[in-house]
C-alpha cells in the first residue's frame, strides 16, 4: 500500500506544527522501545534494573548509550520530518525541495563553515561566561549542574581509542544529527513557520531558537542558535537541504575529529571548548570572512535559479 496520494492543498501550518509535535512524541516512544529491546538483547534485564547500563559509565556499556542516542535522534527528528510530507500526500524529496547539489555551492558551504569556526568559538566562550541576576542564582546553579552532567556524557562518547570509535562517532554525532535535525528544523519547522508568519527571516530565527533550545544547553544556546540560523539561510537561499545538511555535518564532524586528534596526542579534551585559540583580531577576521562568503553563497544561488 502506498502512502503517496494525489496532490492536494496543504493543511494549516498550525496543524502541521501540531502534527510534527505529535509525530515527535510518537517517534520518541516507538524508537525508545526498539532501542530498549536491542539493549536488553545485548545485556539482558540489566538494561532495566541497572542504571549503569544506560549511563555508559563503563566502556562495556557504552554501546547501550550510543544505541539509545541514535534511536532518540531518529524518533524525535527524522520520523516526524518524514511523516509530515507523507501525511500531506507528497514525497519528502519534493516537499522539502531536495534540489540536485552543485559542486561549487558545496565548496562554498565548506568554506563558510571553516572560516566561521573562530567566530563561533568566540560566541561560545562569551556564552559560557554569562551570569544570571542574583534572584536567579538558584536557576543558574541548576543549569551549571545540568551542563556538567551533559559534559560528562559528551566526554564519555568522545573517548576514542582508534579508527573504529572515530567512525562510530562520525556516524552518531555528525551524520545522523545532520540528516535528522536538518529535516526536522529547517525542512519541517522553518518551512511551516514561514507559512505562518509570511516572513522567512522570522521563520529562520525562530526555528534556529527552537533548534538550540531543544538541546537544553543554556551555555551553548547562542552559538547553536547562530549555527541554526546559518543553516536556515543556506536552506532558504539554495532551496535545498543538501547544503544545510553538509554544513551541519562539517560542524559536528570537526568537533569529533578535534577530540580524536587531541586524544592521540595525549591532550585533555575536557578543555577543548573552554580555552581561546585566537587573538581578538582573529575572531574579527573570521566574522568578516563569514559574512563575505555568505554573501557570495547567496549571490551564487541567485545565479543558479
Image: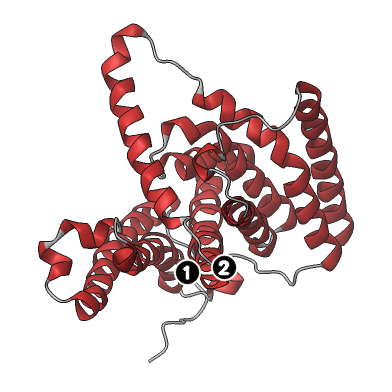
The residue lying furthest to the front in this view is 266
Does the image show residue 275? Answer: yes
The percent coordinates of residue 275 (x first, y second) are: 60, 31
**Relative image position of residue 99 (x, y in whole percent):** 71, 69
Position of the N terminus, as image quadrant, is bottom left
Q: Is disc 2 surrounded by few (<14), some (14 to 19) or many (20+) residues within 10 Å?
A: some
Query: Residue at left 85%, top 53%?
Result: 302
Q: Are the residues tagged 1 and 2 within 8 Å (C-beta)?
A: yes
Mark carried by residue 240: none
Instruction: Label 1, secondary structure: give it.
Output: helix
Name the residue beneath numbered marker 2.
Answer: 95
Left or right: 280, with 95 as reference point:
right
Q: Please name the residue that numbered disc 1 is placed on.
A: 85
Q: Secondary structure at mark 2?
A: helix
Q: Is residue 247 left or right of residue 109?
A: left
Judged left or right of residue 63, residue 285 is right
Residue at horizontal 30%, vertical 22%?
A: 141
Q: Please tell me which residue is depicted at 65% across the width and 36% down the height of the picture.
A: 120
* Place of residue 86 in the rendered image (x, y in percent of width and height, measured from the top left): 44, 74
Amino acid at each position: 500500500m502506498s502512502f503517496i496520494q494525489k496532490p492536494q492543498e496543504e493543511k494549516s501550518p498550525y496543524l502541521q506544527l501540531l502534527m510534527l509535535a505529535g509525530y515527535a512524541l510518537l517517534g520518541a516512544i516507538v524508537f525508545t522501545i526498539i532501542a530498549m529491546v536491542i539493549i536488553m538483547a545485548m545485556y539482558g534485564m540489566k538494561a532495566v534494573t541497572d542504571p549503569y547500563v544506560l549511563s555508559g559509565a563503563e566502556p562495556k556499556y557504552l554501546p547501550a548509550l550510543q544505541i539509545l542516542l541514535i534511536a532518540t535522534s531518529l524518533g524525535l527528528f527524522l520520523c516526524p520530518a518524514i511523516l509530515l510530507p507523507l501525511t500531506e500526500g507528497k514525497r519528502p524529496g519534493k516537499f522539502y525541495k531536495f534540489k540536485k547539489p552543485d559542486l561549487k555551492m558545496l565548496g562554498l558551504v565548506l568554506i563558510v563553515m571553516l572560516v566561521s569556526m573562530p567566530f563561533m568559538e568566540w560566541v561560545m566562550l562569551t556564552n559560557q561566561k554569562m551570569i544570571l541576576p542574583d534572584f536567579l542564582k538558584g536557576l543558574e546553579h541548576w543549569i551549571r549542574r545540568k551542563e556538567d552532567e551533559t559534559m560528562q556524557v559528551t566526554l564519555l562518547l568522545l573517548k576514542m581509542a582508534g579508527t573504529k570509535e572515530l567512525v562510530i562517532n562520525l556516524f552518531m554525532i555528525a551524520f545522523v544529527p545532520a540528516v535528522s535535525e536538518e529535516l526536522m528544523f529547517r525542512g519541517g519547522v522553518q518551512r511551516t513557520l514561514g507559512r505562518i508568519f509570511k516572513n522567512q527571516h522570522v521563520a529562520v530565527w525562530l526555528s534556529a531558537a527552537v533548534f538550540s533550545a531543544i538541546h537544553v544547553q543554556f551555555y551553548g544556546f547562542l552559538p547553536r542558535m547562530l549555527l541554526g540560523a546559518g543553516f536556515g539561510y543556506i536552506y532558504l537561499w539554495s532551496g535545498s537541504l543538501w547544503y544545510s545538511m553538509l554544513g551541519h555535518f562539517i560542524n559536528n564532524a570537526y568537533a569529533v575529529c578535534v577530540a580524536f586528534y587531541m586524544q592521540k596526542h595525549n591532550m585533555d579534551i575536557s578543555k577543548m571548548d573552554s580555552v581561546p585559540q585566537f587573538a581578538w583580531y582573529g575572531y574579527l577576521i573570521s566574522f568578516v570572512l563569514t559574512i563575505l562568503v555568505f554573501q557570495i553563497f547567496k549571490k551564487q544561488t541567485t545565479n543558479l535559479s
